[in-house]
Image (cartoon, helix red, strand yellow):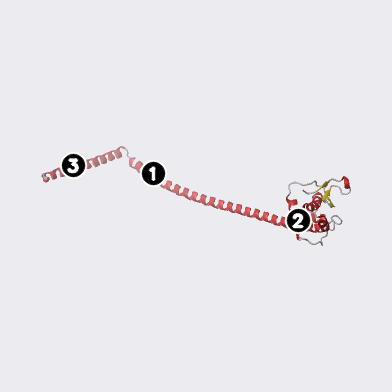
Amino acid sequence: MNTRALYPIKREFSSSRWETLKKVLEDRAEEELWMVHRHPMFPLIWNGVIAALMIALCISFVIWGVNIKIQNTADAITAEAMAQRDAEEAAAQKAERDRLAAEAESEASIIKAEAQDCAKALYGIRNFIEKYSYSYLDCETYLRAAFNRADATGNSLHDVLFQEGQFLACSENNPVLTELLDVSIDTVTEWHHEESRPCDISYQFAELTPNGIYLKNDFNADGYAIRWRAK
């Protein structure tokens, strides 16, 4: 093949391309010049449109940035509010726990003091307890008389127990025996936490018999009185 014969064709092809491009550019320039002559405001309108688009684009970026800042601020405020709410809830829960603990401690202190008074009351009948072999239920029955009196009168258990001449040999000077204190703590705790009475509140008088301790609803009725005993 003769390669030299290709060069004139290549040069002719390249020249043709440049002439075509030149022709297109000239036609485009003439068209734009025609548009300018036909519409003198065209360049101004075109530049205005471009400027408006640029301004709109800038405003969009500004609004986008402001939205991001607002969103970040809102998120920060929300996080702070949630943290404050959580802190308040934690403080409220702690206060409630402290209150319940204080109430429990106070109740435990009250039960302990009342149980000691009850143990002194049981010490007053210790000879009967030993003589008749009174059981735990007999001791509970005896103390129930004091509970009913306290509930009926609104007086404290201490005042009821140590009222002169009411409970046999009951004195504040009586010692507190461990076995009597254990019975008293259980009985007083049940009294504080009971949802319903095991007997009517009128059973306020204890009767010590060889067959056990009973409560009566009338001290003077004797054989006509209704009796009750813990079961």
Question: What's under tag 1, amino acid-wise?
Answer: Leu
Q: Nearer the viewer, mark 3 or mark 1?
A: 3
In the rendered structure, are the residues bearing label 2 and label 3 in contact, judged by CB atoms less than 8 Å apart?
no
Which mark is on residue 16? 3
Determine crowd level at label 3: few under 14, some 14-19, many 20+ residues with C-alpha closer than 10 A. Answer: few
Q: Does 223 sit left or right of 187 as displayed?
A: right
Task: Look at the image and tell me whether residue 110 can be seen.
Answer: no
Q: Secondary structure at mark 1?
A: helix
Point out the tag, 3 or 1, that comes first from the N-terminus.
3
Q: Is 37 in front, or is 15? A: 15
What is the quadrant of residue 105 in the picture?
bottom right
Separation of marks 3 and 1 at Cα, in angstroms = 40 Å
Point out the tag, 1 or 2, that comes first from the N-terminus.
1
Task: Look at the image and tell me whether residue 127 can be seen.
Answer: yes
What residue is disc 1 on?
A: 53
Question: What's under tag 2, amino acid-wise?
Answer: Val
Which mark is on residue 183? 2
Q: Nearer the viewer, mark 1 or mark 2?
A: 2
Q: Secondary structure at mark 2?
A: helix
Q: Residue at x 77, y 61 (%)?
A: 177
| Image quarter in which the N terminus is found | top left
In the rendered structure, are the residues bearing label 3 and label 1 in contact, judged by CB atoms less than 8 Å apart?
no
Determine crowd level at label 1: few under 14, some 14-19, many 20+ residues with C-alpha closer than 10 A. Answer: few
Q: Does 151 sit left or right of 33 as displayed?
A: right
User: Is 1 above or below relative to 99?
Assistant: above
Q: Does 34 sit left or right of 158 as displayed?
A: left
Q: Is 208 in front, or is 131? A: 131
Point out the tag, 2 or 3, that comes first from the N-terminus.
3
